[in-house]
Amino acid sequence: MAEKIYTVLILCTGNSCRSQMAEVLLNHDLAGQVRALSAGTRPQPKVADGAIAALQEAGLNTDGLYPKDIDAVLNEPIDLVVTVCDNAKETCPIFPRPIPAIHLPFHDPHGEPLESFLAVRDDIRARLVATVRETFGLQVAVA
């Protein structure tokens, strides 16, 4: 029988930076174990250039990334919600069924130099990937 693939929703306000980086990092680092989605409570028009650059600098695929409203993912079979900014935590929507949620805030590098985006990317990779892995009891993928 195939292993369960857990669906994780990363919520932020604008869905243009931290949540987008978290989505890509989780889908890459926990491939085959986790399917990450991201959305925003007030999505921005586009993904931040610094977020795209930081992901590409790490060799990660950024094709098709765009900010999504929370309504676009409400019907998904979500196993865990992660809020990555305090504002999203305060305005986190009420889901049709109880879903475990954790709050793991990250610095917002919007408007800052690329180095800030790289630092936030690495922080997300270190803390969020580990937290999701522990939450579901997942094994570390061997490269």
Image: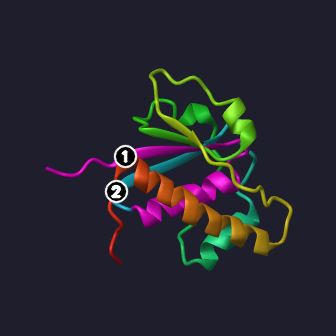
Which residue: 61% across, 75% down? 56
Q: Residues within 10 Å of mark 1 (few under 14, many from 20)?
A: some
Foreground: 6 or 16? 6
**Which stretch did the figure color magenta?**
1-30
Circle 2 SS class = loop
To which residue does mark 1 refer?
6
Which residue: 53% across, 69% down? 61
User: Relative to 139, is 82 above or below?
Assistant: above
User: Relative to 37, is 62 above or below?
Assistant: below
Give left or right: position of 65 versus 115: left
Foreground: 57 or 85? 85
Q: Position of residue 124 (x, y in %)?
A: 60, 61
Figure coloring? rainbow
Q: Is residue 26 magenta?
A: yes
Q: Is residue 6 magenta?
A: yes
> Hey, what amino acid is under mark 2?
Leu
To which residue does mark 2 refer?
138
Q: Please report contact status of discs 2 and 1: CB closer than 8 Å, yes or no.
A: yes
Foreground: 107 or 7? 107
Give left or right: position of 93 versus 17: left
Circle 1 SS class = strand
> Hey, what amino acid is under mark 1?
Tyr
